[in-house]
Amino acid sequence: MSEKLLIVEDEPVLLETLVYNLTRHGYLVESAGDGYVALDLARRSHPDLILLDVMLPGLDGFEVCRILRQEMNVPILMLTARDDEIDRVIGLEIGADDYITKPFSMRELMARVKAQLRRVRLLREESEVQAELVSREILRFDNLVVDTTRREVLLDNNPLPLKPKEFDLLLFLARHRGQALSRELILSQVWGWDFSGGSRTVDVHIRWLRAKIEPDPARTSRIVTIRGAGYRFEG
């Protein structure tokens, strides 16, 4: 999908040149000639980048930038005809992401635009990855990792082939680490109350699970048997 740009510039010739060149490079371009129209367009279209002239009729670029920065996190590249350090400082202090002084070459402008869009894409991708990690429940027990979202178990970083009910059983045990769990409770939570099989089913699946996750299945340390009660997962 093409990225959407909003150009705010009151010089008709420069505005036409910017629209032409940015459109030619594959961007979707909207334009405004004053600050009030710019605010309305930005709020309605949510552009990926705004090119914002400082000297605008009605509402100047600094005020437009200040208002937009309070409402959205879009990158703003300010354009100015004055090569004045105080203007650059003010622009950056109120939230502009970059600053370019007129006259500028189209090559320089394109480089600035691409750099800002690339930065936004990287931040968005990083944010999506972090959100995915937060939403995923990953249980770690030394060399044993249970990824609930992917329904995957790793032992020494190697995928462990588990049957669906083996995974469900391990997940239930892992979520209740250190707790004594009766066979009846395990059966009801993993297999469901309407399961017609007996508690022997739990013992069989525990044995299968131990054979796959215990360092020494003959001397269990991860899934401990509690005599007369059930099992306890130690991790």
Image (tube, helix red, strand yellow):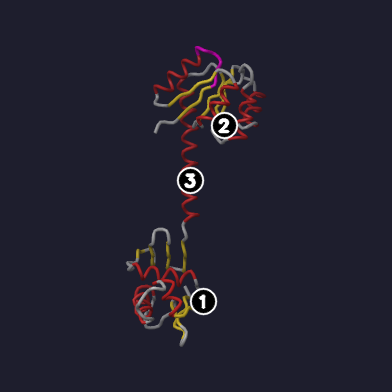
Task: Look at the numbered disc 3 and give the secondary structure of its residue.
Answer: helix
Q: Amino acid at mark 2?
A: Asp
Q: Amino acid at mark 1?
A: Gln
Q: Nearer the viewer, residue 168 or 109?
A: 168
Magenta residues (range): 8-13
- How many angstroms separate mark 2 from mark 1 (CA)? 53 Å
Q: How many marks?
A: 3
Residue at 53% over, 26% down: 41
Task: Look at the numbered disc 1 and give the secondary structure of its residue.
Answer: loop
* Rendered location of residue 36, percent (x, y): 60, 22
Nearer-N-terminus badge (2/1) = 2
Residue indicated by mark 1: 179
Say whether residue 119 is left or right of residue 156: right
Nearer-N-terminus badge (3/2) = 2
Q: Residues within 10 Å of mark 1 (few under 14, many from 20)?
A: few
| Location of residue 190 (image quadrant) | bottom left
**Callout 3 touching callout 1 (CB < 8 Å):** no
| Location of residue 57 (image quadrant) | top right
The label on residue 126 is 3
- Foreground: disc 2 or disc 1: 1
Task: Look at the numbered disc 2 and give the secondary structure of its residue.
Answer: loop
- How many angstroms separate mark 3 from mark 2 (CA)? 19 Å
Quadrant in which the N terminus is drawn: top left
* Rendered location of residue 84, percent (x, y): 64, 20
**Residue 210 covered by magenta stretch:** no
Residue at the bottom extreme of this rendering: 228
- How many angstroms separate mark 3 from mark 1 (CA)? 37 Å
Residue indicated by mark 2: 97
**Callout 3 touching callout 2 (CB < 8 Å):** no
